[in-house]
Amino acid sequence: MHSELQTAIYAEDQKYQDEIHRGLRKVFEVSKYLDFPFTLNEVTTYFLSEGQVTEEELRDLITREDFADLPFQIRDGYIFAGEAKSAAARLEREQFSASKLGSATEFATVLTRLVPFISTIAVTGSVAYGSARKWDDIDLFIVTKQNRLWVSAFLTLVLIRLSKLLHLRPSYLLQFCLSYVHDELGFVNESQRSKSNMLFARELLKAQPIAGIDQYRSFLEQNSWINSVYSKAYPVKLKQLEQRAGARKSEDGSHSPLLSFLMDWAEGFAFAFLSRYLRLRAYLTNLQLKSRGERLRIFEPKTSPRSCVYTSNFYRWLQALWSDESVP
């Protein structure tokens, strides 16, 4: 009986160690690829199961080399994958990210005044994570009123082009990319498909909303299942959004039958034109990326009347990590 109890305890302890190892493997792979160190808090909050280990316990595990196959080093409060470097490089990228986020906020203020169909705008990707290099894209997550996605996307692209032609800001602050755009019904459908998807939950929590704060908060509330995955980060994010909530009222969307007909026609035309243009542009961009050997940056545009989403090889790689599939 005593031997059976010891065996059970050992098996449970081994399961616990394996779960932590899988989480730290994600940290190591992502940190190594991005050349970007994470803080202990970021690791325990977004890479390991909630409450699985504290920051001090994590520091102790790494210091004692419990996971020798993952050569981490801790310095200045950061976890480095491989040989430790100065934290100054991370601080520089945080500064680039902050500058790009500020540029996106100014852009969103103008855009939402000119395009009343946009419900919310958020920044995702490397800028949202604070890991952006100087010439990294500013990935925009946009949700529009129903059946107004492609008109909104067209007007957004026109404004981006004008901003570049007029040199309103340095070029590296105008690298906007419409990487994740839905109308309201399209986002509801995407949310339903992504239930229990930890990577989707992580991206939604880490996104930085810059317009339509109330609407973005409602997106999180509608996806309350995220709280079961990130029970520490979820309520904190909701509290932050509550404090930032604005008083700006959105348009009710009611128009005359003639104007609605014209807008529906414009939406159909914009979809037919832009979906083809974006696929051609993606093809040409991918040719350049292939020639430079940047395999993980290659992306595929997926378009429909309700959605326009760029799915990169890097995102697929992250999905493989988060689902514990083999890493390509």
Image (cartoon, rainbow, N blue to C red):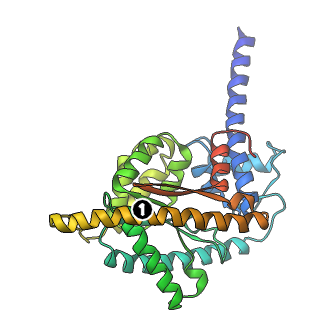
Mark 1 residue crowding within 10 angstroms, few (<14) / some (14–19) / many (20+): many
Q: Residue at x 80, y 48 (%)?
A: 70
- Name the kind of residue labelled 1 in the image: Phe
- Above or below — where is 14 with respect to 318? above
Instruction: Give whichever of 250, 231 is nearer the camera.
Output: 250
Residue labelled with disc 1: 271
Q: Residue at x 73, y 40 (%)?
A: 326
- Above or below — where is 269 with respect to 157? above
Whether residue 126 appears in this view of the structure is no
Left or right of 212: which side holds 252?
left
* Picture coordinates of residue 316, whole percent (x, y): 64, 49
Whether residue 244 appears in this view of the structure is yes
Q: Residue at x 35, y 50 (%)?
A: 221
* Picture coordinates of residue 246, whole percent (x, y): 30, 70
- Above or below — where is 187 with respect to 247? above
Counting labels gives 1
Left or right of 115: which side holds 256?
left
Left or right of 166: which side holds 87?
right
Outermost top residue:
1
Q: Secondary structure at mark 1?
A: helix
Q: Quadrant of the N terminus?
A: top right
* Picture coordinates of residue 135, whole percent (x, y): 65, 76
Instruction: Give whichever of 14, 280 is nearer the camera.
Output: 280
* Picture coordinates of residue 160, whole percent (x, y): 48, 79
Instruction: Give whichever of 236, 229 is nearer the camera.
Output: 229
User: Image quadrant of residue 213?
Assistant: bottom left
